[in-house]
Image (cartoon, helix red, strand yellow):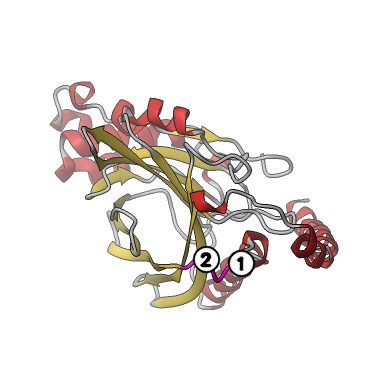
Amino acid sequence: MEVLYLVLSVFSTSITSFALSLLLPFRLVLRRDDNDSVVSLYEGTVWHERLRPVHHSFRYPVRYALIDLDNASNNTPSDHLSSHQARSISGTTGPVFLLTIPPSVGYVQNPLSLYYCYDAEGSSQNLKKCIAEVTNTPWGERVSFLFNPNSDVVAKALHVSPFMDMLGNWTMRTNTPGDNLFVTISVNHPKHGDYFSASLMAKRVSSSTHTDLALFFWLMPHKVAFWIYWQALKLWWKGVPFLQHPRYYNPRYRGEAVLSDEKLQCCPVFVFEAQNNQQAGEHCSNPAAHSTSKRHCFTWRDAKWPWC
């Protein structure tokens, strides 16, 4: 049923996107000022490398928008937090910017979106916290959490790939967006060690040379989806084991991710033992006293039919 739905979804998305693409020339003629000054455009490269159980690496070009959520009106994405919500979660007082791939001709594909939450300190503004939104494919599930942009370690809380289990943690880091922007993520696993890393390296491009966002991001989500499925096919061809979604064999995986995150901050040397046999509590007399469930503020969005 799920395979049939995936095929039908690809077919219907292709038809819809083709039809909407035909309307783009009319948008150029009828285009009005969409308050593009609140959107900064970035162009760069996503790079992935897996070291175990087989070596596999790839890179592909991407385009991102950095949206000033406090001043955005027409460009505010409907499937994301508002600036007020982001400030409430992060506890910050300044502006909020959203880094994301906007929808294109009826299709959305966003493996990772980031909110950059600033503190206002007098006349200066300093990046204090980030909120990550990680969305898996094809399920469309999402986990959101806070992290320290300078560097933070977060327990893995989402089944992001059928070629990765739920063990391990993410180490995340990003900079204050300017002319250059980077995001790095590495995965540390109890068996494979530091076996996976991913990065986004991008440069800001002039919005004066890309006056229409619909054209700048035309088919960008479709390209990202294609690369995801193509690389998954390559991993399968290389013999990497295909893993079921944890909801089929461990419905408590979300709660266990929160527990692992708490123990990761309480006693990191025992976190992998906790993931393997759930017995690390004996090494940590009071993990709740060091709890990061509030600090990282995990929230999940369930998959939709038929993936639920």
The answer to which quarter of the image holds residue 30 is: bottom right
- The answer to whether the residues at label 1 and label 2 have Cβ atoms under 8 Å apart is yes
Amino acid at pointer 1: Phe
Q: Secondary structure at mark 2?
A: strand
Q: Is residue 278 visible?
A: no
Q: Is residue 28 magenta?
A: no
Asked if residue 85 is positioned above or below residue 63 in the image, the reply reads above
Check the image and report above or below for 7 versus 236. above
The x and y percentages for residue 258 are 36, 33
Q: Residue at x 73, y 57 (%)?
A: 31
116, above or below 111, in the image: above
Question: Of the numbered discs in the image, which one, if any, rests on residue 52?
Answer: none
Q: Answer with left or right where residue 183 lies relative to residue 288.
A: right
Q: Residue at x 57, y 66 (%)?
A: 228
Could you say where residue 209 lies in the image, as x and y percent from the top left? 55, 71
Give the amino acid at mark 2.
Arg
Residue at the spot of label 1: 216
Badge 2 density bin: few <14, some 14–19, many ≥20, Cα 10 Å = many
Which stretch is magenta? 206-210
The image position of residue 128, as x and y in percent, is: 26, 39
Q: Which mark is residue 63?
A: 2
Between label 1 and label 2, give the one nearer the viewer.
1
> Does the magenta run of residues contain 208?
yes
Q: Quadrant of the C terminus?
A: top right
